[in-house]
Amino acid sequence: MKNLIMAIGLLLVLGVSTFTPTGNAVEKVDIFVYTETVQWIAQGQAQEEADEFIKEVDGQPGIGDVVNLGSKDIADWTKDHTVKEGHHIIVLFGDIHPEIYPAANAKKDGSIAEEFLDAGNTFTNSADYFFWGLAGRNEEGGLQNMMDIPGIVQWDDNTQMSVTKEGKKITPSLKDYATDRPFHTDQLDNKWEVELALASDSGDQKGDRCDPCIIRNVNTDARLIQVYQTNGQKDPKGKVLAEIILNYYLETVGALAVEPEKKLPITWGEIKSRR
């Protein structure tokens, strides 16, 4: 009888210790970092920022494969990762290659890049205007077509950004600065929302301009994350992007099974309730 009781106790302990509620858990997030062509940042500097980002995220819980490949691989990788709410990430530094978004907006709907985004995955961008393309191959149409928002733009050089309360906790490397291509949150339609502003023109979640920030599609769960869209500035782009992914994104999309005592003090639900 004593041995039976001990065995039952051991099973109970093992059951408690190995059970972890996952909620809406997803597979690990795979990341494609693209530095072959860049804009508003030297290619060498973009590679340094990419290397810093990769060093920070590679091998972390919730992260799958992290690759730093070029244009010959980007289309196949993007197609392979176009899965519903996969939350996989493509990291850009001012250019989106025609292999996934044809030049001059030749395919306004249904490009490889748009299919990836619409499935519920994520693009990040640093340096120049989101989806503008090298030497302006897409201009304003890139962002407008990818978001399906006619007229949305990203102008305003030297727009002062103040780190928000949430930004100070999630991205400790981020300081107040001036961006050249902020997100114009006042131009979003009802399909897109500001999920999280790490810095904004108002210093809170209600600003009309933000950078860095996460813009989320409420229907597909797709996200656009921009980090330091600046011209030639030596900002800690890779470090801050890594902090966003590790300290917020992974848990928010369900790639982590985090116990309550280990969670960040700021959650998406709390942020939304304040707006």
Image (tube, rainbow, N blue to C red):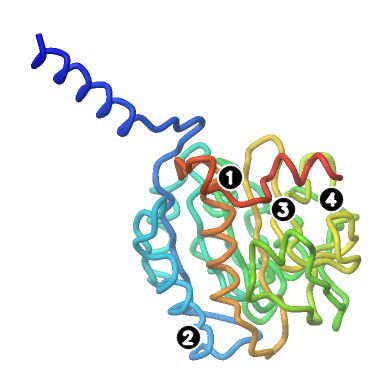
Q: Please name the residue that numbered disc 4 is placed on.
A: 188
The kind of secondary structure element at disc 3 is strand
Q: Which mark is residue 252?
A: 1
Labels 2 and 3: the sequence-earlier one: 2
- Callout 4–callout 1 Cβ contact below 8 Å: no
The kind of secondary structure element at disc 4 is loop
Which residue is at 76% across, 59% downward?
197
As shown in the figure, which amino acid type bears the numbered disc 4? Leu
Could you say where residue 59 lies in the image, as x and y percent from the top left? 34, 61
Q: Is residue 257 left or right of residue 111?
A: left
As shown in the figure, which amino acid type bears the numbered disc 2? Glu
What is the distance, in whole Å, between disc 2 and disc 3 at their CAs? 26 Å
Which residue is at 76% across, 56% downward?
144
Could you say where residue 188 lies in the image, as x and y percent from the top left? 84, 50
Q: Is residue 264 left or right of residue 273?
A: left
Q: Please name the residue that numbered disc 2 is placed on.
A: 48
As shown in the figure, which amino acid type bears the numbered disc 3? Ile
